[in-house]
Image (cartoon, grey):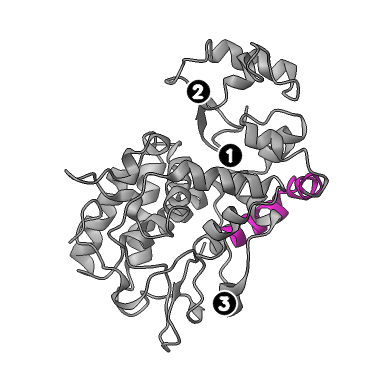
């Protein structure tokens, strides 16, 4: 994934996203639910404002932002990321989720990395984010980059690159192909883009408390979700034994949770999507047809890459609108 920086017309060769802002926001679930409503084909004006209106519209987007200011930046991020992923196979899912959660709350500004302070609760301490991991790797990357190119590489760009490189380590290709997309700042997220991002569920795990109501109390009457594959539901019940269980995790893509592939869409068609939002994707004919296309690996890789680029353009900060942090967990 090549990510980009909005230049407001400045004629500079650029590569990545943003400088960071000092903002933090714990209200992730609202934006996520609006996003998933749109992904499921349901109209939601708030979801559009939450996602589309944040896309940078100030100028053209270009790659290779650090080509001159810090030519070693990409290699530093890749080498450290690959070192950790080689011994920790769950990191790709963690970094993808970190990048996603960062971008969908006020844009890709690395606010997800900030620690809480005495008068402010940080994003990372919000309930949906408490299972995020990989912050130590981001800190290691930042420390090395500060030695190599002091005050140059933003923490937001590090998160974006770590997400790219961790997945690339698994599939041995850069699934997010580079291209020049000046007109992309005016693009909107369409159903295909949302569905492709949902394909990120092909790696990683889900906590029982986020889906156990489908097993034990779907309509509030102690019943199960009839749309859930019965064999899969029985398996989930062996892992999640009650509605109160908030510690146990289960692979989101049975049999393929450590491989970045299109298998998520195959199991989705078999009614084995874990979350209610997964099941909702099958209720709309339009999204169902797109799922049929995304089952093909090449199609999924292409669409996922393009969708990540669009996500990476949300609320881009430029000029004096942010800062390059010295440490990613605190503002300067």
Q: Of the numbered discs in the image, which one, if any, rests on residue 145? A: none
Residue 84, image x, y percentages: 36, 43
Chief secondary structure of the magenta span? helix
**Quarter of the image where one finds residue 326:** bottom left
10 Å crowding of disc 3: few (<14), some (14-19), many (20+): few
Q: Please, which residue is most extreme toward the bottom here?
A: 11
Can you identify the residue that label 3 sits on?
180
Residue sitting at x 57%, y 20%: 212
Q: Earlier in the sequence, mark 3 or mark 2?
A: 3
> Which is closer to the viewer, label 3 or label 2?
2
**Quarter of the image where one finds residue 198:** top right
Check the picture and name the quadrant holding the C terminus. bottom left
Q: CA distance from mark 1 to mark 3?
A: 28 Å
Q: Earlier in the sequence, mark 1 or mark 3?
A: 3
Q: Of the numbered discs in the image, which one, if any, rests on residue 201? A: 1
Q: Of the numbered discs in the image, which one, if any, rests on residue 209? A: 2
Residue sitting at x 31%, y 49%: 113
Work out whether 80 lies above or below 250.
Answer: below
Residue sitting at x 45%, y 36%: 90
Residue 305 magenta? yes
Circle 1 sits in a helix, a strand or a loop, which is it?
helix
Report the magenta residues as a range: 287-308
Q: CA distance from mark 2 to mark 1?
A: 17 Å
């Amino acid at each position: 994934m090549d990510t980009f920086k909005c230049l407001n017309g400045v004629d500079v060769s650029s590569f990545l996203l943003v400088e960071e802002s000092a903002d933090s926001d714990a209200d992730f679930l609202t934006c996520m639910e609006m996003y998933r409503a749109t992904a499921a084909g349901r109209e939601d004006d708030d979801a559009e404002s939450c996602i589309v209106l944040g896309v940078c519209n100030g100028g053209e987007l270009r790659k290779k932002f650090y080509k001159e200011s810090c030519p070693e930046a990409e290699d530093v991020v890749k080498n450290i990321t690959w070192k950790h992923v080689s011994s920790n196979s769950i990191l790709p899912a963690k970094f993808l989720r970190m990048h996603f959660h960062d971008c969908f709350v006020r844009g890709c500004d690395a606010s997800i990395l900030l620690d809480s302070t005495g008068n402010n609760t940080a994003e990372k301490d919000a309930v949906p984010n408490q299972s995020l991991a990989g912050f130590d790797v981001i800190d290691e990357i930042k420390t090395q980059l500060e030695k190599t190119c002091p005050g140059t590489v933003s923490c937001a760009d590090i998160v974006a690159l770590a997400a790219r490189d961790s997945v690339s380590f698994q599939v041995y290709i850069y699934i997010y192909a580079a291209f020049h997309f000046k007109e992309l700042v005016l693009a909107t997220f369409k159903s295909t883009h949302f569905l492709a991002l949902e394909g990120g569920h092909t790696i990683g795990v889900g906590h029982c408390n986020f889906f156990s109501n489908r097993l034990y109390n779907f309509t509030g009457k102690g019943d199960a979700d009839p749309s859930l594959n019965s064999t899969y539901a029985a398996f989930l019940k062996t892992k999640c034994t009650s509605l109160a269980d908030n510690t146990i995790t289960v692979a989101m893509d049975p049999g393929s949770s450590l491989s970045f592939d299109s298998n998520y869409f195959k199991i989705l068609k078999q009614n084995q999507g874990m979350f209610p939002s997964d099941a909702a994707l099958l209720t709309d004919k339009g999204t169902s047809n797109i799922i049929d296309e995304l089952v093909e690996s090449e199609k999924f890789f292409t669409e996922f890459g393009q969708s990540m680029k669009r996500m990476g353009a949300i609320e881009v900060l430029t000029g004096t609108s942010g800062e390059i942090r010295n440490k990613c967990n605190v503002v300067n």
